[in-house]
Amino acid sequence: MDQNPQEEFDDEQQLENEIKNISALSIQLVWKKYKTLKAIRQTVKSKREPLVVYYSSIATNQKIRSDQMQLFHMLKVKNIKFYKFDLVDNKMAQGWVKEILNRYQLPFVTINNLFVGGYEEFEILYELELLPRIIKKDYERECILCDEPKVEDECPNCKKPYDFFKKD
């Protein structure tokens, strides 16, 4: 039996709609895979440098934008290598960041995979010129505040933990 022209047109239209839906689904799947791979690559690259700055490229708060720019500038002036980790497209890191945002504002800094805090905490370490020593892990051998050799979990001279800069 032959179909009438209207039924034939409806079948063609239905097929065309299904193809569009499949194409949209395929594009969506490829895009998700791309975003996931990008997030993984970014995370892996961030492990190559001891100092990582977590920031947002689309921050609208003026203080946050200013802190981020100042932090990047301070690191460049001292010629300290670092990795800029943009949190905008990285869903993997966003869960971790939500916990920290309750206590600190962006940018966040980690050194040797130890969270050292936000801009204010970083600025103190920078001004005390402790960053190179923390990056080199001198705190594993001695107190970086008074240069006393490491004995236990706390420096006997200044009564502070050797990794005093580490935040929870």
Image (tube, helix red, strand yellow):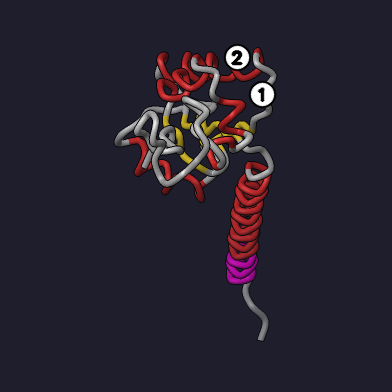
Q: Where residue 141 sits: x, y (%)?
A: 56, 40
Which labelled disc corresponds to residue 12? Answer: none
Q: Secondary structure at mark 2?
A: helix
Which labelled disc corresponds to residue 80? Answer: 1
Please tell me which of labels 2 and 1 falls first in the chain. Answer: 2
Mark 2, other Cα within 10 Å: few <14 / some 14–19 / many ≥20: few
Q: Is residue 147 above or below residue 94?
A: above
Circle nearer the viewer, 2 or 1: 1
Q: CA distance from mark 2 to mark 1?
A: 10 Å
| Quadrant hosting residue 105 | top left
Q: Name the amino acid, label 1.
A: Ile
- The structure residue drawn at horizontal position 42% and vertical position 41%, both measured from the top left corner, is 97
- The structure residue drawn at horizontal position 58% and vertical position 15%, both measured from the top left corner, is 74
Q: Name the amino acid, label 2.
A: His
Q: Where residue 160 sits: x, y (%)?
A: 37, 34
| Quadrant hosting residue 137 | top right
Visible in this render: residue 77?
yes
Q: Secondary structure at mark 1?
A: loop
| Magenta stretch, residue numbers | 6-16
Q: Which residue is mark 2?
A: 73
Q: Nearer the viewer, residue 141 or 75?
A: 141
